[in-house]
Image: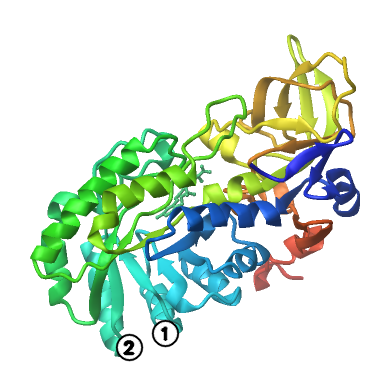
């Protein structure tokens, strides 16, 4: 459930008409709902009630400072995957003991920054990375808390580009080698093994793959404990999917996921961490865009809108579906029209939807891309020298621009001219 609903025929973000935000900010823009972000965080937090747990929001999904602060105020931890994300989490006031550091390619600089600023744990993805963490920690005279990310070789049954738990993927160490790698960890200076980490992919729409992976983790916990390791924490990753198409059957709910976690892992007495990103931010955000032209092709009508693949790349990159709705509902009885909905970027891939039924629209009409809160703004680029679009946060009847649109001048002035071209 989200808080983007029609009232009197106009799409509202909580209590604010989307038309009002568009008039104030211009299009295109991203718009997030505080109530939805909070609701989704609480769904996970409540689902794990009764277990010692921390919900570490995977901030790669949407990392605006205002979003991070909203979640941090509820007690969220953060899952970060770069020095930049670590700095963002700290800037939003998240204490180091609530930040976990994931990712296959942590550099020595990133490791040092996290160790100095405070970190709950590094999720280690390979032996060379473990050696690097050991070396940096020893140099700084610190002890680095680590889990090792195991790759359970489970098919997540999701889009190939976002599946991570099969042996062919670059993530984690094969679970079959886990005992050796934990033994290595115990022998290296500057490391403190605290648990096990697993993440098998994103936009999972069934519980079975999680269940299969967590069973393997439960077994591994017992084995590693028998080997003498202090496994007290299990990081279960993120990945629970969201309903992108309202017409489709919905993926399992956080409460069902939580019940499964308790069933599979509850007996181990471990502290549980989860790293949801999409489920917290996805349906808490929309992208609002304006129709520039309606163009008649040979055999189809194109809706050319001012948002493009550089603003929301998911359809171009993963053939992802986003529901697209008119901001002002069609008058009752009006026949819908069918369009290819495209952006202005000079690539055929700049297509959001083909043959999509939507209300009949005209130039200057507003449309909203639903479920755009996760992996939307964060994956945007300035391709075609299109400015990164603004982000707006709504809270009840208030809204605020949380990232403004840069001017062309600002964009151009980031370039610098070498001496030999001056003159
Ligand atoms: N933890 C780790 C280690 C991850 O790699 C990810 C996502 C998450 C947590 C959060 O997963 P979530 O709960 O959001 O599914 N850009 C793609 C999604 C990439 C996901 C990458 N890793 C998309 O737009 O669908």
Question: Does the image show residue 26?
Answer: no
Q: Residues within 10 Å of mark 1 (few under 14, many from 20)?
A: few
Name the image quarter holding residue 289.
top right
Q: Nearer the viewer, residue 292 or 95?
A: 95
Task: List the residue tagged with mark 2.
Answer: 140
Q: Which mark is residue 116?
A: 1
| 412 lies left or right of 228 | right
| 74 lies left or right of 275 | right
Where residue 374 appears, as percent x and y from the top left, is: 58, 48
Q: How crowded is mark 2: few (under 14 residues within 10 Å), some or many (20 or more)?
A: few
Residue at 44% over, 35% down:
205
Marks 1 and 2 sit apart, C-alpha to C-alpha, by 8 Å
Q: Which secondary structure, mark 2? A: helix
Where residue 330 appears, as percent x and y from the top left, is: 86, 24
Where residue 417 appears, as percent x and y from the top left, is: 68, 68
Q: Is residue 300 above or below residue 90?
A: above
Q: Do the residues bearing badges 1 and 2 touch, measured as CB atoms within 8 Å?
A: yes
- Between discs 1 and 2, the one toward the N terminus: 1
Q: Which of 416 and 326 is in front in this view?
A: 326
Q: Which of 188 and 214 is in front in this view?
A: 214
């Amino acid at each position: 459930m989200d808080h983007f609903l029609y009232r009197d025929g106009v799409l509202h973000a909580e209590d604010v008409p989307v038309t009002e935000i568009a008039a104030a900010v211009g299009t295109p823009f991203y718009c997030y709902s505080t109530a939805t972000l909070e609701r989704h965080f609480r769904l996970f937090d409540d689902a794990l009630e009764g277990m010692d747990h921390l919900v570490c929001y995977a901030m790669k999904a949407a990392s605006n400072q205002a979003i991070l602060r909203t979640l941090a105020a509820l007690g969220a931890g953060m899952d970060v995957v770069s020095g930049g994300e670590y700095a963002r989490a700290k800037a939003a006031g998240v204490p180091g003991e609530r930040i976990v550091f994931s990712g296959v390619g942590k550099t020595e600089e990133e490791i040092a920054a996290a160790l100095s600023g405070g970190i709950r744990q590094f999720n280690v993805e390979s032996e060379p990375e473990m050696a690097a963490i050991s070396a940096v920690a020893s140099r700084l005279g610190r002890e680095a808390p680590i889990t090792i990310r195991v790759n359970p070789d489970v098919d997540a049954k999701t889009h190939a580009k976002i599946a991570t738990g099969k042996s062919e993927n670059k993530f984690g160490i094969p679970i079959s080698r886990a005992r050796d790698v934990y033994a290595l960890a115990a022998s290296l200076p500057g490391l403190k093994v605290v648990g096990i980490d697993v993440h098998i992919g994103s936009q999972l729409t069934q519980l079975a793959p999680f269940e299969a992976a967590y069973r393997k983790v439960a077994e591994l916990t017992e084995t590693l404990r028998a080997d003498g390791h202090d496994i007290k924490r299990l990081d279960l990753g993120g990945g629970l999917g969201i309903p992108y198409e309202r017409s489709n059957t919905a993926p399992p709910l956080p409460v069902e996921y939580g019940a499964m976690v308790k069933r599979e892992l509850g007996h181990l007495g471990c502290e549980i961490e989860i790293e949801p990103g999409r489920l917290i931010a996805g349906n808490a955000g929309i992208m609002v865009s304006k129709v520039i032209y309606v163009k008649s092709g040979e055999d189809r009508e194109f809706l050319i809108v001012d948002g493009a693949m550089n603003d929301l790349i998911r359809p171009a990159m993963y053939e992802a579906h986003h529901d697209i709705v008119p901001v002002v509902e069609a008058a009752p009885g009006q026949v819908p029209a069918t369009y290819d909905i495209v952006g202005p970027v000079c690539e055929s891939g700049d297509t959001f939807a083909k043959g999509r039924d939507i209300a009949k629209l005209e130039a200057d009409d507003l449309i909203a891309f639903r479920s755009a809160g996760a992996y939307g703004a964060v994956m945007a680029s300035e391709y075609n020298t299109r400015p990164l679009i603004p982000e707006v946060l709504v809270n009840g009847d208030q809204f605020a621009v949380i990232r403004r649109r840069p001017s062309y001048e600002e964009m151009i002035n980031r370039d610098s001219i070498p001496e030999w071209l001056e003159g």
